[in-house]
């Protein structure tokens, strides 16, 4: 007895209008029958509203989210931060600088962050500093780590039976490589579990490398492309900058394999005698014997050159090339932050080589870095 329903949308709710069928039977029913029919239809409308409203609330966020996910998944940069923390103000300033000098200029790309510091409070702090950027730390993934990564680095090296002659440089190289390997494992694990989208580019950096200028990222390459980029290298000395690297998804697993090879060489005694390229070392701060000892150590920049042979860092459209930044450490209570030239040690150790180094941080860069750190305290 009821005519075809008329549907209309208003504020996300469904209202049904009903046309009465005007025939002799409805006329004979009288006012009370029509009133009962109206009450019945109103009840049906309210039931429809109650059923459809939860469905709309559930599906509407999914409709809005789908395009954003598709955009992020098309080009993703995984930022891997590994090393030793130098204080909370250094961590906060480093994260802020990555946001303003890497993420914002590359707004068309998505970003994920992997952190391996082996310092639970610092990892938690750095995770909060990146805000809404998807971030995974060693602390978060601790229960899922494989046996070869679950042991802290210092404990692993203590149990490895390394030769007594192994010096501080070599041990620090092993620490660096172990944490780089851990970061790369975090990325591959998160992507395999589909917790993070697959990265097309991996950017490895230190937690105390504070950028002072925009850093142009290498172009997006096919997933199968093999390429590694470094902001500085010296082919004549066989050295490549190790504090910041970029690698395609196909090349990034090399960062995980380097530690195993270096540890095997160190345990067998090969690391202590591994040759550094034949260059003239500075002897201003050491005797000839200690200089000779330095030449026999495995330098981290020499190791990366030998295994990765990185390409030069690309320039941006504005002509900016490579890296500008400082190594930032939090000072003692009430003291100024400690700001160092990232190339200072290379300048000292290879002062008499043919290598050409970037200019040191300017007073303006140091002042802006110090102000950034003081602003986070």
Image (cartoon, rainbow, N blue to C red):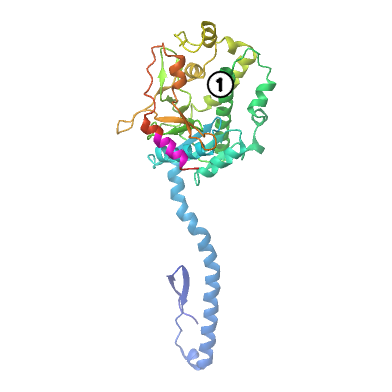
Most foreground residue, 354 or 65: 354
Magenta part of the protein: which range? 367-374
Say whether residue 318 is left or right of residue 182: left
SS majority, magenta: helix
**Residue closest to the far top:** 288
Counting from the top left corner in percent of width and height, residue 23 is at 46, 88
Q: Does the magenta run of residues contain 65?
A: no
Please tell me whether residue 39 is drawn above or below residue 110 in the rendered image: below
Counting from the top left corner in percent of width and height, residue 339 is at 46, 30
Please tell me whether residue 346 is drawn above or below residue 89 in the rendered image: above
Residue at x 41%, y 40% (from the top left corner): 100
Counting from the top left corner in percent of width and height, residue 342 is at 45, 25
Say whether residue 275 is left or right of residue 365: right
Residue at x 64%, y 29% (from the top left corner): 149
Residue 195 at least partly seen: no
Say whether residue 206 is left or right of residue 149: left
For residue 138, what is the image quadrant? top right
Residue at x 48%, y 24% (from the top left corner): 242
**Residue on which disc 1 sits:** 173
The kind of secondary structure element at disc 1 is helix
Q: Does the magenta run of residues contain 370?
A: yes
Report how many numbered discs are placed on residues in the image.
1
**Residue closest to the far front:** 334
Say whether residue 313 is left or right of residue 133: left
Counting from the top left corner in percent of width and height, residue 85 is at 55, 33
Residues packed near mark 1 inside 10 Å, few (<14), some (14 to 19) or many (20 plus) = some
Residue 185 at least partly seen: yes
């Amino acid at each position: 007895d009821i005519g075809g329903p008329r549907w209309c949308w208003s504020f996300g709710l469904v209202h049904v209008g009903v046309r009465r069928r005007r025939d002799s039977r409805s006329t004979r029913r009288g006012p009370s029958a029509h009133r009962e029919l109206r009450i019945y239809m109103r009840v049906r409308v309210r039931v429809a509203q109650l059923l459809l409203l939860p469905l709309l609330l559930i599906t509407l966020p999914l409709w809005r989210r789908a395009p954003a996910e598709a955009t992020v998944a098309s080009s993703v940069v995984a930022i891997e931060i590994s090393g030793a923390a130098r204080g909370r103000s250094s961590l906060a300033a480093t994260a802020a600088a990555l946001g303003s000098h890497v993420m914002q200029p590359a707004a068309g790309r998505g970003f994920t962050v992997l952190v391996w510091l082996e310092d639970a409070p610092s990892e938690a702090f750095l995770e909060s500093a990146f805000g809404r950027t998807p971030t995974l730390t060693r602390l978060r993934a601790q229960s899922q780590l494989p046996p070869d990564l679950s042991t802290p680095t210092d404990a692993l090296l203590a149990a490895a039976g390394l030769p007594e002659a192994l010096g501080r440089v070599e041990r620090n190289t092993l620490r660096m490589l172990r944490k780089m390997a851990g970061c790369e494992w975090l990325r591959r694990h998160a992507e395999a579990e589909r917790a993070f989208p697959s990265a097309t580019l991996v950017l490895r950096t230190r937690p105390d490398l504070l950028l002072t200028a925009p850093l142009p990222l290498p172009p997006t390459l096919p997933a199968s492309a093999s390429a590694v980029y470094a902001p500085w290298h010296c082919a004549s000395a066989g050295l490549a900058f190790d504090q910041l690297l970029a690698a395609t998804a196909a090349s990034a697993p090399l960062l995980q394999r380097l530690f195993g090879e270096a540890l095997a060489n160190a345990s067998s005694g090969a690391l202590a005698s591994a040759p550094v390229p034949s260059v003239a070392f500075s002897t201003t701060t050491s005797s000839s014997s200690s200089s000779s000892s330095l030449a026999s150590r495995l330098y981290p920049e020499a190791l990366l050159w030998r295994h990765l042979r990185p390409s030069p860092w690309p320039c941006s459209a504005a002509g900016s090339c490579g890296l500008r930044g400082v190594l930032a450490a939090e000072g003692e209570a009430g003291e100024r932050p400690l700001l160092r030239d990232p190339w200072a040690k290379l300048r000292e150790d290879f002062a008499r080589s043919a290598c050409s180094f970037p200019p040191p941080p300017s007073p303006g860069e140091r002042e802006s870095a110090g102000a950034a750190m003081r602003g986070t305290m």
